[in-house]
Amino acid sequence: MTEQQLIQALTALCEQCKQDNNGFGWLTHTGRPTSPVVIAVFEHEAQRIAALKSGWDEVFSQRLDAHLAGLDCRVKSIRFDSEQACTQISNGNWERHLQRKPH
């Protein structure tokens, strides 16, 4: 699997998840295309927490599996984060923020 194939699959997933109107805004990944860490980003921490409490993480995981079906990819882990946390913890520096251990 190529980086481009992974990006295409994740872009389609992102557009689908935005329709949930729960504060989810975008996603990214780190690591190799065949074993990425996928990061779903919300605008505010409260939205992230509410989504996780409602079970949205399970829905996201199922959608992720469906979008990656047929591709040679095994997701290493899924991380849920927020713009607010990046601003507070890493001064808005996403590169540095993504390198830290998740909360």
Image (cartoon, rainbow, N blue to C red):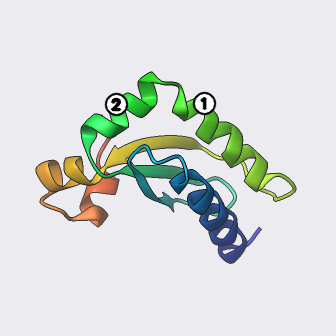
Q: Which mark is residue 80?
A: none
Q: How far from the left and from the top, in percent, is residue 16?
A: 62, 56
Q: How far from the left and from the top, in percent, is residue 42?
A: 36, 49
Residue at image location 74% in from the left, 54% down from the top: 67
Q: Secondary structure at mark 1?
A: helix
Label 1: few (<14), some (14–19) or many (≥20) C-alpha neighbours in 10 Å: few
Residue 7: name its quadrant: bottom right
Residue at image location 46% in from the left, 48% down from the top: 21
Q: Which mark is residue 49?
A: 2
Q: Is residue 47 left or right of residue 11?
A: left
Q: How many marks?
A: 2
Residue beneath disc 1 = 58
Of residues 22 and 3, the one nearer the viewer is 22
Residue at image location 45% in from the left, 42% down from the top: 79
Q: Is residue 91 left or right of residue 15?
A: left
Q: Is residue 95 left or right of residue 74?
A: left
Which of disc 2 and disc 1 is earlier in sequence?
2
Q: Secondary structure at mark 2?
A: helix
Type of amino acid at the residue the image marks with label 1: Glu
Label 2: few (<14), some (14–19) or many (≥20) C-alpha neighbours in 10 Å: some
Residue at image location 58% in from the left, 62% down from the top: 15
Residue 97: name its quadrant: bottom left
Answer above or below: position of 76 versus 11: above
Q: How far from the left and from the top, in percent, is residue 37?
A: 53, 50
Which residue of the protein is positioned furthest toward the bottom in this rendering? 4
Determine contact: label 1, label 2, CB under 8 Å.
Answer: no
Q: How far from the left and from the top, in percent, is residue 14?
A: 56, 59
Q: Quadrant of the C terminus?
A: top left
Type of amino acid at the residue the image marks with label 2: Ile
Q: Quadrant of the N terminus?
A: bottom right
Of residues 67 and 1, the one nearer the viewer is 67
For marks 1 and 2, give the CA distance: 14 Å
